[in-house]
Image (cartoon, coloured by chain):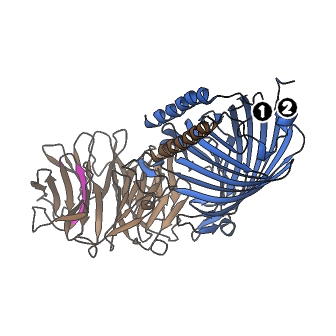
Chain colours: A brown, B blue
Amino acid sequence: MKKTRWVNYLFITAAIFFLLLSITACERTEYDLLDPESAGIWKQYSTTNSTLPGNTIYDIDVDQSGNLWATCYGKGVAIFQSGTWTTYNTSNSYILSNYTTVLEPVTASLLIGTEYGLSIRLTSGTWQYYSDASVEYMIVNSIKCDSHGNYWIGTEDEGYYFYNGTYFYHYLSGYDVNTIAEDKSGNIWLGTDHGLYKYNGTHLTTSATPVLNTSNGLTSNSISTLYPDSKGRLWIGYYVSKTASWVDNNGVNQLNLMDGKEITTIWDIQEDKKGDIWFATGGSGLIRYDGVIPHSYKEYNTPSIDDYIYSICLDLGGNLWIGTRTKGVIKYTLPLE
Amino acid sequence: MKKELSIFTIILSLAIITPLNGQTNSQPGDKFTLLTMPYNQRQLTLYRGQLQANAGYKFAVRSRNYDKNGDLLVLKDEGTASVFHYYFLQVRYGITNFLELSAETNYLKHGVRSLTTEYYSLTDNITVNTLSTKKGVGDLLIMGSARLPITFKWFDFGIKGGMFIPTSKYEPFKPTHSVTSVTAVNTFTVNYHFNNTNGFGVPVYVLGAVAKLSYSKLSLETDFSFKTPSKEGENVRWDETLTASKTFTYSNKTYKYLLNNDIEFNASLHFQATGWFNIQLNSNYYSSKGGWTEYWGAKYKNPEEYLFSLEPAFEIQISPALRIYELAGFPIFGKNKDAPFYLFMTLSYSIFPFLK
């Protein structure tokens, strides 16, 4: 009797042990989880290690399907899908020129600025274009599709063109319109070589007064880029300055980029998913502003990148894509804290 | 569902087994004998009617950690060594000679001061000091333990199950950064101070089993415990912006997380030198994986962690009601885990409130 009881105890003990072990074996698996080792990594795509057609990337952006587009200066435009770059240039498409400058993905099409006007690639694969025959050059510097579906095309020395879905209208001739942005309230801002303008329902003329210029807060009148961030600030980058500015309800604020140089050009500005602001600069590499301090990423401390960066964008997964002057495209996955 | 089913199976097994194998417990009824029972003759749970209060303090010197490759990093060289204070309070009660209930909580205090960093350009200089503190009361752990319903002579076996109830304030408090030594617009010192808290934020289940084998003055005890979260949690990260007047404004963003599953094994060899003094060497293996944390909209796997430590310890019976337990921990190998040296002292006070 006593022996049988001990056999029972041992059996129960073994059974409970196996039960506990089986519970621990039931580990949950999440197949869409990312590897923490992939964070904080710079990955370069250039003509030597990929099918990217050129290493000078003036602009880079992501369309609504998550595809990455890059303007490769002198080589047309390229799309990155499934790890491969596909190129559209004058030899295989109806793009106006291989000297592509900027691009703007919009619903059902892609707007591409070139040194000879605007090319439009519809999702169907058909191409359209607009080039103003009345001007000597239509070098497109900036493109913005506003929340009403209108196109704003900024040019070098020829002001901007406004397209309402039917006609193109031409304004501010003689000005460089380098950048156009729409803020959360739907205001359209134009950054020019004469300061910052705001569209108030009436299109601009050369007699219009800029909202901001050096007389009321800007560091320079030569604005290179504008970026409205998620906190309601409008960031302003300049051609030759060592500061960036932002405008909020309290007025104009200056941010010293602390890049060790007296002057630099801010070519592009982008907010990441963490809320940090990134500046793509000519000569000072990348600068990340975390709300307190500007952090510098240059060739000497980040060998993967170029000191000359023209463009930066965010993909749907929160990765930064960086267009450089000589090193092609660089992908950066944000580090985990 | 699988997990709930497993817990239910254990409880059901106990409910069936206990009456089938129930026997009159023949433990001595003298409370003095029970309170002073040496470790090698003591059963795994408290005796019927025994109430025990344990208060502990752990002091850890966090001077090294193991990186993702298992290599040892000396934090002292990086200027980020720190100390860690952990207090715990536990109350246990023996409902029967083979069933026990307990409740415990803890308080944690830990501060990490990072190496001072300088950011400078030709004309500007920003100095950054960072202090990250973690302190607060932890979650309340309610446990039930059961052992074989036999008189312990040389073999004992028990299981335990419970849950951490998320009673603590687990979300980090708003940071309390400051700016000092302002000598120019861009020459100043930033003092970051992050205020983290203690607690899991979600209910966490605990399951475990323990076995004990005694032969003369020697005893061998092994235990295993498994900890798993009941669901995903949500927490916040603070973000700061320095204003032109050198003050900070703060905002926060929520993120989701799933805690890791933790497994812990202990195996200890005890020697009962005299009736009031027991010495032991414990080996502890801790492993943690299976969870994830959301960063900037993407879910990342939590890095797998493990740590193996050796822990020499002793137990002294000071008086019939009072016992002291002292342990020192020495990490041997690990991965993605701090490797602190620690001292853990516990005072244990036992009474039989209902036994004359």
Residue A256 falls left or right of residue A133: right
* Distance between mark 1 and mark 2 Cα atoms: 10 Å
For the residue marked with disc 1, what is the amino acid? Gln
Q: Residue at x 26, y 74 (%)?
A: A47
Q: Is residue A103 magenta?
A: yes
Q: Chain of mark 2?
A: B
- Which residue range is magenta in the image? A100-108
Q: Is residue B170 visible?
A: no
* Placement of the N terminus of chain B among the 4 image quadrants: top left
The answer to the question of whether label 1 and label 2 lie on touching residues, with beta carbons closer than 8 A, is: no
Q: Chain of mark 1?
A: B
Residue A30 falls left or right of residue A2: left
Dot 2: within a 10 Å radius of its alpha carbon, few (fewer than 14), some, or many (20 or more) residues?
Answer: some
Write down the residue under mark 1.
B27
For the residue marked with disc 2, what is the amino acid? Lys
Judging depth in this view, the residue of A312 and B309 nearest the camera is: B309
Residue B31 tag number: 2
State the SS at label 2. helix
Q: Residue at x 60, y 64 (%)?
A: B66
User: Residue A286: horizontal and vertical position, in percent?
Assistant: 44, 65
